[in-house]
Image: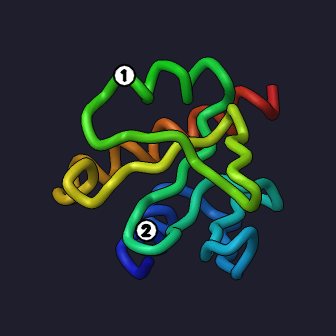
Amino acid sequence: MERVGQVLSASTGGVVGRPMMGAYCFMVDGRMCCGVTGDALMLRLGPEGALAALKEPHVRPFEIGGGRQPEAYVQVDPPGYATDAALRAWLGRSLEFLRLMGD
């Protein structure tokens, strides 16, 4: 959780962390960006970005209560974001999705 907050804060402003949806979530400029649930990284990538990410190693659908799987989110297990470069890359994808949403 601390690593995620540090990388996000170094990448962009307006980062706020808080518990939500059974995870510790990070908001960027008031919009959900990502979070940590258990030891997995939860990312908001949009439906197309999430579908593409699911083809990559260590990525699985994000599940919330009742087994629901929001199509815009994925979870990345620890081996998928073990290095700082991998974590920055994943968070960059989520930040890019937010940037595109704002356009």
In the displayed structure, 102 sits above or below 55; it is below
Residue 55: mark = 1
Residue 33 in picture, x, y percent from top left = 65, 53
Q: Is mark 2 on a helix, strand or loop?
A: helix
N-terminal of the pair, mark 2 or mark 1, is 2
Residue at numbered disc 2: 4
Q: In which quarter of the image is residue 84?
A: bottom left
In the displayed structure, 90 sits above or below 48; it is below
Disc 2 residue crowd, few under 14, some 14–19, many 20+, Cα 10 Å: many
Side of 4 where 49 appears, left or right: right
Of badges 2 and 1, the one in the foreground is: 1
Q: Quadrant of residue 10?
A: bottom left
In the displayed structure, 42 sits above or below 74; it is below
How much space separates mark 2 and mark 1, taking CA atoms? 23 Å
At 78% across and 31% down in the image, what residue appears? 101
Q: Quarter of the image containing the N terminus?
A: bottom left
Three-letter code for the amino acid on which mark 2 is drawn: Val
Residue 91 in picture, x, y percent from top left = 45, 49
Q: Is mark 1 on a helix, strand or loop?
A: loop
In the displayed structure, 57 sits above or below 74; it is above
Residue 102: mark = none
How many numbered circles does the render carry?
2
At 48% across and 36% down in the image, what residue appears? 93
Query: Which residue occupies the foreground of this view, 89 or 80?
Result: 80
Query: Which residue occupies the foreground of this view, 25 or 27?
Result: 25
Q: Which colour scheme is used?
A: rainbow
Three-letter code for the amino acid on which mark 1 is drawn: Lys
User: Do callouts 2 and 1 mark residues in contact (Cβ within 8 Å)?
Assistant: no
